[in-house]
Amino acid sequence: MSSNFNFMQRDGNNRFVITKKHIIGIALGVLFIVFLSCLGRIGEDVRNEEIVVNQRAFSGRMEYWTEPGFKWQMFSRTTSYYKTQQYWFGGKDIDGESHGKPIEVIFNDASVGYIYGSLRVQLPTDIEHLSKIQTAYNGMNRLMSDLVAQNVTKVIYASGPLMSAFESYAEKKNDLI
């Protein structure tokens, strides 16, 4: 039984011979694989709710994209931030998703309370402030955990000794909020 398709070319001694077609085919295959692996680093579609920081390959120059649309990434590394994000401490959000433990506060009468709540974080869109944020935190998760969460906890904890537990519930509740 003979086959009409003979992909392997052999010389007179029945050895496989690499031809120019084989080399071109292998090179094109390797280039295609490289292209597919780099496809995600050619461009970035910036969404309306995002700020994207693009750090150029080789030069390290930073670009800050705050407007939506397609941007040429040019094989660079990007970091995304949300323009605004809700930070929750304790309790559940509207969707019923749990958000960790509430923040403990000790009042001046030595009683302990737990504060549940949330706040909205809105990032600046000017290059000076974005540069400081990118340099210090390099991502939304670190910004929220290392800056926002730590400072909210410290502020709430420090506000406890300014009132008693009864005052925090009755007279000075708005001050605490």
Image: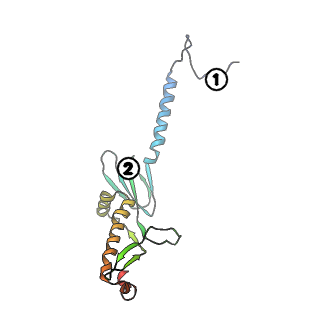
Relative image position of residue 90 (x, y in whole percent): 44, 71
| Left or right relative to 98: residue 78 | left
Image quadrant holding the N terminus, namely top right
The residue positioned 30% from the left and 80% from the top of the image is 161
Quarter of the image for residue 48 reads bottom left
Is 103 located above or below residue 163 in the figure? above
Going by the numbered disc 2, the residue's amino acid type is Arg
SS type, badge 1: loop
SS type, badge 2: strand
Total labels drawn: 2
Quarter of the image for residue 170 reads bottom left
Relative image position of residue 148 (x, y in whole percent): 35, 67
Relative image position of residue 114 (x, y in whole percent): 40, 76
Q: Residue furthest top?
A: 13
Going by the numbered disc 1, the residue's amino acid type is Phe
The residue positioned 50% from the left and 33% from the top of the image is 29
The residue positioned 44% from the left and 64% from the top of the image is 49
Q: Which residue is mark 2?
A: 77
Q: Which mark is residue 169?
A: none
The residue positioned 35% from the left and 83% from the top of the image is 175
Q: Which residue is mark 1?
A: 5
Structural distance between the alpha carbons of marks 2 and 1: 46 Å
Foreground residue, 71 or 158?
A: 158
